[in-house]
Image (cartoon, rainbow, N blue to C red):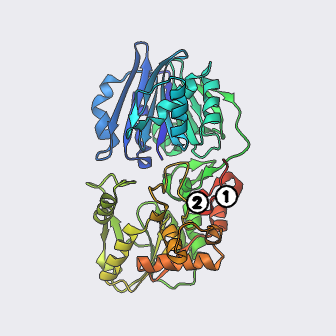
């Protein structure tokens, strides 16, 4: 997914920018970047953070950064920030999202004799393409509107100019942006968890498609929000940090509500409940409290030397990291009937190994309760559950086994009250070796979040979305 952070201050902003960006490290694995501007011009740095903490890569360079305003990014793929020289002036840019029509937009640019200097995995750098779309117009505001009109998928962005920061949230609000305030400074962030320890109070939530100009004295709306919104539901279920809020709704509270809903619909008798670390913990606490059973940790996460495992793209690396990071505790597992809560089941390969280990350590029963419905559609907007093949998804693989083909209507399987859905879940259960398996219903997930369904993107589960 990725995350953005920016700050405009009357004083030097580098320390706040450094720590504020670092608070987004849970959102991506590939690249981290910072850029600041002062009277002498722009300074930027980009590092690969696949095998190291963001802080360890950037801390030695902070002495070279001076400025009262800057932007930072944790990126899934492309190198950012970019510094662009154009008729609009020199500016820095960072983006979060996914451009579905990247190739066609690139071809259209080439037809107009445009060129791109940055690359990302031998493709056009999405952030540079966004910058090109902005520079096609006569102002930053008009350029961002051009982005909204041109891009299929999603894109939220920050622009760093000599005057301050321009923040723009995705047209349908799939990714969030919030403004924080303290005396003499304003910050903009993908995560409100970046604010408290830096002394900021959350002051404003940008709406879908809204554009805001931010200075050290305040912020000004350049474009009003759109009425339609489809914010990603996975922000609460999985992506988001527990102490963050989106649309004034706290992540940990939603996960607790998800766990409660799972427990209310469950008649299994168990000795304890646990969450797959880390994002499954909040769900499991809600489950345990609703059921009145202990919350314990049969698996403990080991982080000192395994810090980066968010979404390794290589399956072998994924399996290795999953196996090495989660250490089983035999004293808690032996002879117990275990309930495990997790945010989701994407491919299920890691979970299958973990379940086998639990039985090898003497678990009597292993029941899995999943905080969201079954994933059967790859994400088209935020790089979650994307894959070279839809058959990598556990739900889609089960459907193919049932039907003998992947090219079938999926509506029946997406309906959590249907016989087809139950058959799909049973296929997944058998493959994972679980005693029982249940997924959250769409109705309970929507209720746990607390927004109307039409304001949530639920494409991964039921295929619905705005174009």
Q: Is residue 183 visible?
A: no
Q: Position of residue 351 (x, y in %)?
A: 39, 70
Sequence-first disc among 2 and 1: 2
Does 229 appear above or below 93? below
Question: Under tag 2, what secondary structure?
Answer: helix
Where in the figure is residue 251, as x and y percent of width and height? 55, 55
Label 2 sits on residue: 254
Name, please, the residue furthest toward the top: 39
- Give the camera-side residue of 122 and 65: 122
Marks 2,1: beta carbons within 8 A: yes
Residue placed at 49% from the left, 53% from the top? 384
| Alpha carbon separation for disc pair 2 and 1 | 8 Å
Q: Secondary structure at mark 1?
A: loop
Q: Please give the name of the residue rendered at 31% of the width and 57% of the height, measured from the top-left corner.
A: 303
Crowd class of label 1 (few under 14; some 14 to 19; many from 20; radius 10 Å): few
Work out whether 299 lies above or below 34: below
Residue drawn 40% across the image and 30% down it = 118
Q: Position of residue 174 (x, y in %)?
A: 60, 46
Position of 308 compared to 179: left or right? Answer: left
Identity of the residue drawn at 51% across and 33% down: 106
Question: Does 454 appear above or below 150?
Answer: below
Which residue appears farthest toward the front when viewing the image?
111
- Name the disc covering residue 450, or none: 1
Image position of 12 with respect to 326: above or below: above
Neighbours of disc 2 within 10 Å: few (<14), some (14-19), many (20+): many
Q: Is residue 152 something that shows in the picture?
A: yes
């Amino acid at each position: 997914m990725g995350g953005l952070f920016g700050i405009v201050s009357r004083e030097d902003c580098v320390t706040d920018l450094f720590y504020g960006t670092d608070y987004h490290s849970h959102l991506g694995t590939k690249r981290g970047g910072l850029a600041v501007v002062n009277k002498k011009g722009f300074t930027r740095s980009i590092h690969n953070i696949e095998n190291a903490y963001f802080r360890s890569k950037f801390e030695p360079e902070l002495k070279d950064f001076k400025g009262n305003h800057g932007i930072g990014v944790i990126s899934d793929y492309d190198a950012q920030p970019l510094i662009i020289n154009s008729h609009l002036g020199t500016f820095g840019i960072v983006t979060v999202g996914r451009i579905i029509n990247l190739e066609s937009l690139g071809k259209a640019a080439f037809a107009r004799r445009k060129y791109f200097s940055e690359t990302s995995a031998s493709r056009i750098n999405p952030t540079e393409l966004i910058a090109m779309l902005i520079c096609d117009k006569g102002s930053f505001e008009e350029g961002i509107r051009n982005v909204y009109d041109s891009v299929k998928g999603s894109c939220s962005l920050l622009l760093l100019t000599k005057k301050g920061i321009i923040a723009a949230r995705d047209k349908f609000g799939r990714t969030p942006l919030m403004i924080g305030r303290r005396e003499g400074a304003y910050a903009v962030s993908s995560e409100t968890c970046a604010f408290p320890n830096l002394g900021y109070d959350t002051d404003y939530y940008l709406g879908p498609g809204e554009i805001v100009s931010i200075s050290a004295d305040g912020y000004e709306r350049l474009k009003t929000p759109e009425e339609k919104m489809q914010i990603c539901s996975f922000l609460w279920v999985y992506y988001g940090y527990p102490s963050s809020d989106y649309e004034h709704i706290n992540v940990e509270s939603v996960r607790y509500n998800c766990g409660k809903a799972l427990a209310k619909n469950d008649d299994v008798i168990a000795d304890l409940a646990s969450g797959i670390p880390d994002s499954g913990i909040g769900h499991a606490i809600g489950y345990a409290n609703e059921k009145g059973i202990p919350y314990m940790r049969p698996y403990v996460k080991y982080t000192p030397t395994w810090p980066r495992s968010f979404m390794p793209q290589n399956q072998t690396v994924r399996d290795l990291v999953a196996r090495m990071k989660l250490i089983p505790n035999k004293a808690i597992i032996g002879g117990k009937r275990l309930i495990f809560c997790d945010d989701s089941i994407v491919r299920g390969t890691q979970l299958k190994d973990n379940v086998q280990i639990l039985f090898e350590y003497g678990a009597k029963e292993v029941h899995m309760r999943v905080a969201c419905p079954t994933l059967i559609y790859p994400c088209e907007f935020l790089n979650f559950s994307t894959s070279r093949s839809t058959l990598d998804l556990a739900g889609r693989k089960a459907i193919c086994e049932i039907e003998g083909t992947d090219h079938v209507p999926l509506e029946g399987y997406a309906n959590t009250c249907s016989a087809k859905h139950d058959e799909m879940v049973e296929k997944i259960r058998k493959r994972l070796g679980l005693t029982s398996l249940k997924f959250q219903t769409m109705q309970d997930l929507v209720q746990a979040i607390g927004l109307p369904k039409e304001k949530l993107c639920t494409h991964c589960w039921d295929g619905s979305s705005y174009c």
